[in-house]
Amino acid sequence: MRKVNARKIQDAVARLAIEANLFLREDVLSALKRAYSKEKVSRAKKILKALVENAAIASSEKIPICQDTGMATVFLEVGQGVIIIGGDLNEAINKGVAEGYKKGFLRKSVVFDPLLRVNTKDNTPAVIHTKIVPGSKIKITVAPKGFGSENKSVANMFRPTDGADRIERFILEAVKKAGPDACPPYIIGVGIGGTLDKACLLAKEALLRRIDKRNPRRHIAKLESGLLKKINRLNIGPMGLGGKATCLGLNIEVYPTHIAGLPVCVSISCHATRSATRTL
Ligand code: SF4
């Protein structure tokens, strides 16, 4: 068994929380630049230019891309040949989030009780998803998500016979409803299948895939490309002020499901879609 110290995990999470909030993902930044060069509507072009400049300033001045530095979602892939020593895994992650948000001067946005709403003052706890995988490494991804976009995410249980057309309409409706509210141009993650909770997790995982990489299943890849085109015809545009760039990328993840159901979740994410990964 390979030993990994909990302190090492804490340090990695702290660094990743800062990195994700300061440096826009390369695939998202490239897509913003491409959208800028293609955009014809002058107001939309100006906004895209401002978003590219904003990302450059954040990275050079070491300040967050957006004031909403999000709730930290942490995805872990823990090799079954690893033994964690010197502390508790979840505690190490939360300590890392607290440290990163403090050191990086990132806004603390988490309230301890969803109804009493008292701020925990260190942005913990994180939402942690852990998978046990073959091997003896630990892959950590920190994905902070602002709630301007999280508030626009939706899920639904369809009838098994509803099919791709009905799902397409549901996704288009979700984007129309989000309109300008979740800071477009959007990145959209869709989860189809499993149970309702699995579909929501798949939608979040879909946001982690590079937006220039299509799903390996041909019919799903076709659905991704078709939906992206349809969304970009909605004329919501950057910041909702019109234009072609409503969505920079749409990724769908699927999972087997029950004969009697068809769960779907749409995770809407903004132009500041953030994540950073490290393998220990
Ligand atoms: S939706 Fe995104 S860009 Fe808009 S405020 Fe929230 S985190 Fe920032």
Image (spheres, helix red, strand yellow):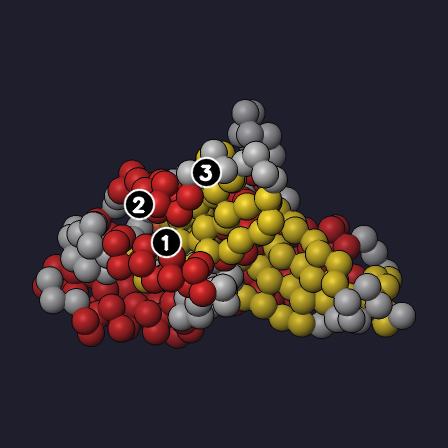
Q: Residue 270 carries which label?
A: 1
Q: Give percent across and percent down for residue 65.
A: 39, 61
Q: Is mark 3 on a helix, strand or loop?
A: loop
Direction top: furthest residue: 115
Q: Ligand 1: does it lie within 8 Å of the C-beta at label 1?
A: yes
Please tell me how crowded label 2 is: few (under 14), some (14-19), or many (20+) other residues with Cα within 10 Å. some
Measure how far apart labels 3 and 1 are at the Cα level: 32 Å
**In the image, what residue type sits under mark 2?**
Leu
- In the depicted structure, whether residue 38 falls above or below residue 189: below
**In the image, what residue type sits under mark 3?**
Thr
Nearer-N-terminus badge (3/1) = 3
Residue 259 appears in which quarter of the rendering?
A: top right
Q: If the image is split into quadrants, where does the C terminus sit? A: bottom right
Q: Which residue is drawn at 32% across and 55% down?
A: 227
55 to the left or right of 121: left
- In the depicted structure, whether residue 23 falls above or below residue 261: below
Measure how far apart labels 2 and 3 are at the Cα level: 19 Å
- Nearer the observer, 157 or 207: 157
Instruction: Find disc 2 in the rendering and name its residue.
Output: 172
Q: Is mark 2 on a helix, strand or loop?
A: helix
Nearer-N-terminus badge (2/3) = 3
Please tell me how crowded label 3 is: few (under 14), some (14-19), or many (20+) other residues with Cα within 10 Å. few
Instruction: Find disc 3 in the rendering and name its residue.
Output: 161
Q: Which residue is drawn at 34% across and 73% down?
A: 30
Q: Give percent across and percent down for residue 244.
A: 19, 60
- Nearer the observer, 22 or 222: 222
